[in-house]
Image (tube, helix red, strand yellow):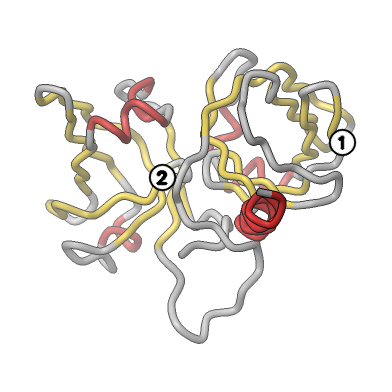
């Protein structure tokens, strides 16, 4: 379980294809890698991955299943790409974001990324996503970042990015057209399923 509050960013050293799967190797800050153990869960751009290697103080590796490559944007990564990183929640930690499982529901395209004053406007296209669950002023997780859906309608979601979020995440290198991983609010998905069952 995660909160969607990004701890730091890492950069891709290698994405090695291994048949239908792959191995992802990242360079991370030494203090982040130094606290990781084999088998630990880390959200990488919002995808819950298992640490399979830690070496040289700041190199961290993950094995990617074929399913992970199919339903996320991790296969789009290239050498030098920035990724958002968050370790799993610890018992007793302050909870500042929203419930994030690290289970990506779909990928979406960025349709607007523009500076407005000190902030940035981020718009993504949900028109091709089945079972999208987004409420205006509700929570949405994009590439692992817990964000507020400020505007929802016409198959689009707009989130406003403050300078702190821009500085602490990979959004500082965002571009229109890029794919992002989306995880819809867990509570909203449970309510949707309960409603479906009660009406069947």
Vertical side of 101 occupied by 11: above or below: above
In percent of the image, x 46 and y 41: which residue is there?
45
Q: Quadrant of residue 35?
A: bottom left
Q: Nearer the viewer, residue 65 or 49?
A: 65
Q: Residue furthest front?
A: 200
In percent of the image, x 43 and y 38: which residue is there?
83
Q: Residues within 10 Å of mark 1 (few under 14, many from 20)?
A: some
Residue 76 placement, left or right of 13: right
Q: Quadrant of residue 126?
A: top right
Residue 42 placement, left or right of 128: left
Vertical side of 187 occupied by 180: above or below: above
- Residue 134 got which mark? none
Spot occupied by residue 87 in the image (x, y as percentages of width and height): 40, 62
Q: Residues within 10 Å of mark 2 (few under 14, many from 20)?
A: many
As helix, strand or loop, the secondary structure at mark 1 comes to strand
Real-space Cα separation, disc 2 to disc 1, in angstroms: 25 Å
Q: Residue furthest top?
A: 177
In percent of the image, x 51 and y 38: which residue is there?
105
The residue pinned by badge 2 equals 47
Residue 5 placement, left or right of 133: left
Spot occupied by residue 151 in the image (x, y as percentages of width and height): 87, 36
Q: Residue furthest bottom?
A: 92
Spot occupied by residue 165 in the image (x, y as percentages of width and height): 67, 47
The residue pinned by badge 1 equals 151
As helix, strand or loop, the secondary structure at mark 2 comes to strand
Vertical side of 51 occupied by 142: above or below: above
Q: Earlier in the sequence, mark 2 or mark 1?
A: 2
Spot occupied by residue 60 in the image (x, y as percentages of width and height): 22, 49
């Amino acid at each position: 379980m995660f909160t969607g509050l990004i701890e730091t960013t890492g950069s891709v050293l290698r994405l090695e294809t291994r048949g239908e799967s792959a191995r992802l190797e990242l360079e991370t800050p030494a203090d982040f890698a130094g606290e990781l153990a084999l088998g630990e869960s880390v959200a990488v751009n919002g995808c819950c991955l298992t640490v399979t290697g830690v070496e040289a103080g700041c190199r961290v590796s993950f094995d990617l299943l074929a399913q992970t490559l199919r339903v996320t944007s991790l296969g789009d990564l290239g050498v030098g790409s920035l990724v958002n990183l968050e370790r799993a929640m610890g018992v007793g930690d302050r909870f500042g974001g929203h419930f994030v499982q690290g289970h990506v529901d779909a990928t979406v395209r960025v349709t607007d990324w523009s500076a407005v004053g000190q902030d940035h406007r981020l718009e993504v296209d949900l028109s091709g996503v089945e079972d999208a669950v987004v409420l205006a002023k509700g929570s949405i997780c994009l590439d692992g970042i817990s964000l507020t859906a400020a505007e929802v309608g016409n198959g689009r979601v707009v989130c406003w990015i403050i300078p702190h979020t821009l500085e602490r995440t990979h959004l500082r290198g965002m571009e229109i057209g890029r794919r992002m991983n989306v995880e819809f609010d867990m509570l909203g998905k449970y309510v949707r399923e309960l409603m479906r069952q009660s009406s069947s």
